[in-house]
């Protein structure tokens, strides 16, 4: 999530599992090498892939806590609020929020993003 969650690491791990259950990682379980292989197998030639990575202050998950609870990393995942509700007891959810909410609202995270731009011609 881009925030320091060491104080609530056991809770964060359970929330992460609820966010990306096994078998549902279809939008994040590949890399740029897979894209090249799939495009080549599909008959694209030539291919050009540009890769960009960013590390910067802030987080995609920032703003009001209520808004962040309604965010999902991709359309196949539950929202953060749904994952917290599924993974944690009410007392644990309160502890998790007490730690994460101030960080989110102060945008005190670290953004880590990567992009792959793939262009090809169908032969």
Image (spheres, helix red, strand yellow):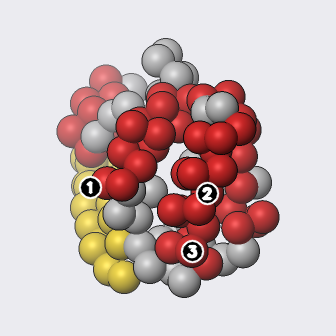
Of residues 53 and 86, the one nearer the viewer is 86
User: Is label 3 in contact with label 1 (beta carbons under 8 Å)?
Assistant: no
Of residues 60 and 119, the one nearer the viewer is 60
Of residues 1 and 73, the one nearer the viewer is 1
Q: Residue at x 71, y 38 (%)?
A: 90
CA–CA distance in space, label 3 to label 1 = 39 Å
Mark 3 neighbour density, 10 Å: few (under 14) some (14–19) many (20 or more): few
Nearer-N-terminus badge (2/1): 1
Nearer-N-terminus badge (2/3): 2
User: Is label 2 in contact with label 3 (beta carbons under 8 Å)?
Assistant: no
Image check: 11 left or right of 118? right
Element type where label 3 sits in the image: helix
Q: Position of residue 62 (x, y in %)?
A: 59, 73
Q: Position of residue 82 (x, y in %)?
A: 72, 38
| Residue 106 visible, this angle | yes
| Residue 123 visible, this angle | no
CA–CA distance in space, label 2 to label 3 = 8 Å
Nearer-N-terminus badge (3/1): 1
- The residue to which callout 3 is attached is 102
Element type where label 2 sits in the image: helix
**Which quadrant would residue 39 be assigned to in this image?**
top left
Q: Position of residue 32 (x, y in %)?
A: 27, 44
Mark 2 neighbour density, 10 Å: few (under 14) some (14–19) many (20 or more): some
Q: Tell me the number on the disc at residue 72.
A: none
- The residue to which callout 1 is attached is 49
Q: Residue at x 27, y 67 (%)?
A: 53
- The residue to which callout 2 is attached is 97
Does 65 sit above or below residue 43? below
Q: Residue at x 44, y 79 (%)?
A: 108
Image check: 40 left or right of 107? left
């Amino acid at each position: 999530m881009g925030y320091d969650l060491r104080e609530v690491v056991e809770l964060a791990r359970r929330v992460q599992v609820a966010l990306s259950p096994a078998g549902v990682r279809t939008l994040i379980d590949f890399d740029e090498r897979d894209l090249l292989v799939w495009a080549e197998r599909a008959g694209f030639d030539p291919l050009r892939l540009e890769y960009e990575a960013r590390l910067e202050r802030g987080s995609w998950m920032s703003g009001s806590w209520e808004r962040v609870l309604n965010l999902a990393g991709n359309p196949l995942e539950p929202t953060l609020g749904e994952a917290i509700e599924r993974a944690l007891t009410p007392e644990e959810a309160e502890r998790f929020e007490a730690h994460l909410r101030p960080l989110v609202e102060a945008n005190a995270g670290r953004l880590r993003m990567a992009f792959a731009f793939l262009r090809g011609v169908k032969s």
